[in-house]
Every structure is written in C-alpha cells, then in structure tokens.
C-alpha cells in the first residue's frame, strides 16, 4: 500500500505538476502586467485599512489574511526550507523566491475569484473558494470538478493539516520528556476551544497569534543574521551561484545539481505558501469587502510574507551558520543553526514548530469545514468540528508515514481543479482588475489606501 501511494505521489508532485503550478503563476503575472509587483505598496496600505469591516462578509480583510496565514505559516517554514536546502543545495532558496514572485499572482487571482463568486449559506455565513468559483464561474457542467476539489480538500485536511500536525508536535515534545498522550489531550482542548466557536473565533485567534509568532521568529532570525552580518553578501552569492551552477559536496552534504535546486525549491516553496493549492481563497471569501480586487491584493501578501520573508529568514540562518554539512535535515537542521548562533536558540525552533502546527490545525479546520458545507450543507458543520477535534489525539500517537503520503497526494489532487479554474477564469480576473484600477485612478475618488 505504501509503495503504491509513494508511486502515485511521485506522479502527483512530479515535473508536470510543478510546471503547471509555476506556469499558471507566470501566465497570470504577465497577463496582469506584473500588477502584483507594481501594486505591492498599495496592497500593504489596503491591509492596514482592512483592520475594520469595509463591506459584506464575516470577518475583516486583515483577519481573513491572518486566518489564511495561520494555515500557511507552519512547519514548512522551518522544516520545509531546511529539507529543500539539504536536498537541493543553497540554490533551492533562490528558486523558492522565484516561485513566490510568480505565486503572488496566483494567490491574487484566487482572492479575486473567491470574493467574486462566493455565496451565503443557510446560516448567513459566507462560503467561497475554488468549489464555488468553479461552479458559479465555469457553469453547471463543471460542477463535478468543484465536487472533486471539495472532496479532496476535506480529506487532505484531516491528514496533512490535522493528524500529521498533532503527530509532529507530539514527536518534538517527546524529546523533552512529555508523553504523546498528554500532548494529544492538550492540543485537543486548545484547538477545540477555538474551532468550535466558528470563523469569528478562528479569525480573532489568528489575528492575535499569527503576527506575534511570525514577528518573533523573524526577529530571532534577524539577530542571528546580524551576528553574521559580514557573511551576508557571500551568502547571497552562494545562494544565487548554486541556483545556476549546482552545489558542490562538503562534509556531510552530498552536493546538489541545478535540477535538484529547481525541483526542491519550487516544490517546497509551493508547499509553504500554498499558492495554487486553492486553500487560502476559502478564508479570503469570508472577508468583509465589496471589492474582489482589493481582497486579491491582500491575499497576495500571504505569499510575500510566508516565503519572501519567513522562509528567507530560515534559509539565511542555515547558510550563514554553516551547518549544512552537518548531515542533519528538516527541523533538526534549523534547530542546530539557531543553537549554534544563540544560546538556547534550538528552543526557538521547538516552540515555533509547536505554535505553527497548532495554528495550521486551526486555520485548516475552516478550510475543511467549508469543503464539507459545499458537499453536505450546513448541517454537517458541527459533526465535522467534533470529528476534527477528536482526530487530534489519535494523530498524536500514530505512525503517520502513510497518512502523510496520502494527504500529500490529495493536496496535489486539490491543486489540479483549482489551477484549471484559474486558467479558464483568468479573463474575469484581468477584466475585474482593469475595471477596478480605471475606477480608482489617483484623484478620481479612490478610497483611502487604494491609490498609489
């Protein structure tokens, strides 16, 4: 069974998928006239003005982004970056940057379509995301594709974003003497307290925790970088050189080809920022806004913050501290990097893994819930939340190897319907964007924060 799933996973996340993901981002970037780069300052101004409600929806635009980031900023920023550099060399970080630059356009389009085609459920809440913009944007004959996305999303959430996350936390805490049973129960109570309160409580929690944890991690990274400031120029030269020339072997590091740098940089970059997977637009669909383009600009900041800021910090710390040839990988390599630069620095990584995993479980619970609502209606909300909470302690004590593989494969199956929809609906994104910026030219009545 594991061999079969591994084979399927290899095809699901093979070169074809990476080309489709990156190619969609490149197509949208050019189609939008590099809007995502030109309008970046404007997007940050919109984020600041999005602290309060500005239209119809369930949560403020800022909280929609924080809910999205709670699911996005996770163990991938700590363990995923380290794994990419271990397997692909320092050059993998450069290809993560390239993936993020084009991925911003993918995330922008997801945010625009999520608000444009969202619906209100029987309880008055807003539901949106790929399943809705596939059905409402492409028409009834594409409804099967929307159903496929919702099914894969609900199933992947239970694996990759729930049981695997609780297992990761349990394994980290076992190393310091805390039994997995205790970890499972505590996580169940913490996560259950938040998600049983619905999107409002999830958004409030995410808005409080995500900025603090991200800033704390970035601050600790900046301290390490500051202690090695004289090596920073050489580190960037190493990263860029390895991206095009490969990385030579050194110590316990086996070396890496250019293709390895591209493959693992692109793959881990997408795993980290989720641009193209279709998860983030589910959160952005709940934003209190009447302007799809404005939420699209806020949405694209998720990729910028996750990869170009947080992942860059992790990568620079690893390269600067010279631990790449230690033979370690994943979170252990990142912990070693921080520990070698700061007394007790490895505890930063341990705490980061725990907090990031918990927020991932909270954020993804909303994604899974909206997928279930699409499939079965609002009557399935409470049963889903209860099952989600009960699965947490189960995951803490299981061998999650095959569950991780299955969930990973389902993640790829989520991405395919979403990417098809983004490409087919790209004219809608281009038209809405053009109309919005025509209406909000400088000195023509643009709202606060919506002019350059």
Image (cartoon, grey):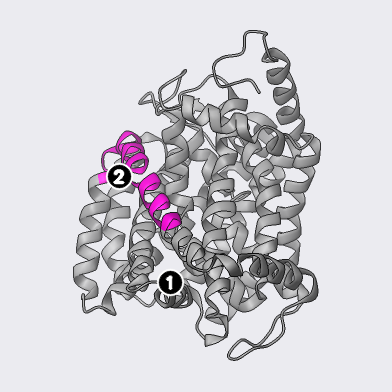
Q: Position of residue 358 (x, y in %)?
A: 34, 56
- Would residue 14 be visible to someone looking at this image? no
Note whether 152 is above or below 330 in the view shown: above
Query: What residue is pinned by disc 2?
Result: 195
Query: What residue is pinned by disc 1?
Result: 338
Q: Position of residue 91 (x, y in %)?
A: 69, 70
Q: Main secondary structure of the magenta part?
A: helix
Q: Which sits earlier in the primary sequence, circle 2 or circle 1?
A: 2
**Magenta stretch contains residue 195:** yes
Q: Residue at x 70, y 20 (%)?
A: 437
Q: Residue at x 52, y 43 (%)?
A: 280
**Badge 2, how many Cα within 10 Å: few under 14, some, many 20+?**
many
Q: Residue at x 66, y 30 (%)?
A: 137
Measure the alpha-carbon separation of dots 2 and 1. 33 Å
- Would residue 375 be visible to someone looking at this image? yes
Considering the numbered disc 2 on the image, is that residue within a helix, a strand or a loop? helix
**Magenta stretch contains residue 308:** no
Q: Is residue 411 left or right of residue 126?
A: right
Judge by depth and name the residue closer to the eye, 449 or 25. Answer: 449
The reply to whether callout 2 and callout 1 are in contact (CB within 8 Å) is: no
Q: What span is in magenta?
A: 194-219
Quadrant assignment for the C terminus? top right
Considering the numbered disc 1 on the image, is that residue within a helix, a strand or a loop? helix
**Badge 1, how many Cα within 10 Å: few under 14, some, many 20+?**
many
Dividing the picture into quarters, in which one does residue 248 lie?
Answer: bottom right
Mark sitting on residue 447: none
Note whether 344 is above or below 93 in the view shown: below
């Amino acid at each position: 069974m594991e061999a079969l799933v591994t084979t399927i996973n290899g095809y699901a996340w093979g070169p074809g998928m990476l080309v489709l993901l990156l190619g969609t981002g490149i197509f949208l970037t050019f189609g939008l006239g590099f809007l995502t780069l030109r309008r970046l300052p404007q997007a940050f101004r919109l984020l600041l003005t999005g602290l309060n409600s500005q239209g119809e929806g369930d949560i403020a635009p800022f909280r929609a982004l924080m809910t999205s980031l709670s699911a996005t900023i996770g163990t991938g920023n700590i363990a995923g970056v380290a794994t990419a550099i271990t397997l692909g060399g320092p050059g993998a970080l450069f290809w993560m940057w390239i993936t993020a630059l084009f991925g911003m356009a993918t995330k922008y389009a997801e945010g625009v379509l999520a608000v444009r085609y969202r619906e209100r459920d029987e309880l008055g809440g807003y539901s949106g995301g790929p399943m809705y913009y596939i059905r409402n944007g492409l028409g009834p004959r594409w409804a099967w594709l929307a159903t496929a996305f919702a099914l894969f999303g609900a199933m992947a959430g239970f694996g990759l974003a729930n049981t695997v996350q609780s297992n990761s936390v349990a394994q980290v805490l076992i190393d310091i003497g805390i039994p997995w049973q205790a970890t499972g129960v505590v996580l169940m109570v913490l996560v259950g307290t938040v998600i049983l309160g619905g999107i409002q409580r999830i958004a409030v929690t995410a808005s409080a925790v995500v900025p603090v944890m991200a800033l704390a991690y970035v601050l600790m990274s900046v301290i390490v970088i500051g202690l090695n400031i004289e090596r920073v120029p050489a580190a960037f030269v190493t990263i860029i050189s390895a991206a095009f020339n490969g990385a030579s072997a050194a110590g316990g590091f086996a070396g890496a080809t250019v293709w390895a740098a591209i493959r693992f940089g692109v793959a881990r970059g997408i795993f980290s920022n989720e641009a193209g997977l279709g998860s983030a637009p589910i959160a952005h669909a709940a934003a209190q806004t009447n302007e799809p383009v404005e939420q699209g600009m806020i949405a694209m900041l998720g990729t910028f913050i996750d990869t170009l800021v947080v992942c860059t910090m992790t990568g620079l710390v690893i390269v600067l501290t010279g631990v790449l040839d230690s033979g370690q990988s994943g979170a252990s390599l990142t912990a070693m990097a921080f520990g070698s630069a700061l007394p007790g620095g490895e505890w930063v990584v341990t705490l980061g893994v725990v907090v990031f995993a918990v927020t991932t479980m909270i954020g993804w619970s909303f994604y899974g819930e909206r997928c279930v609502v699409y499939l079965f209606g609002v009557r399935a909300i409470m049963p889903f939340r209860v099952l989600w909470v009960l699965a947490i302690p189960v995951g803490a004590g299981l061998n999650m190897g095959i569950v991780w593989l299955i969930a990973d494969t389902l993640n790829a199956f989520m991405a395919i319907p979403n990417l098809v929809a983004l490409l087919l609906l790209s004219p809608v994104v281009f038209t809405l964007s053009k109309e919005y910026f025509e209406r909000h030219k400088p000195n023509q009545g643009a709202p606060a924060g919506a002019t350059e």
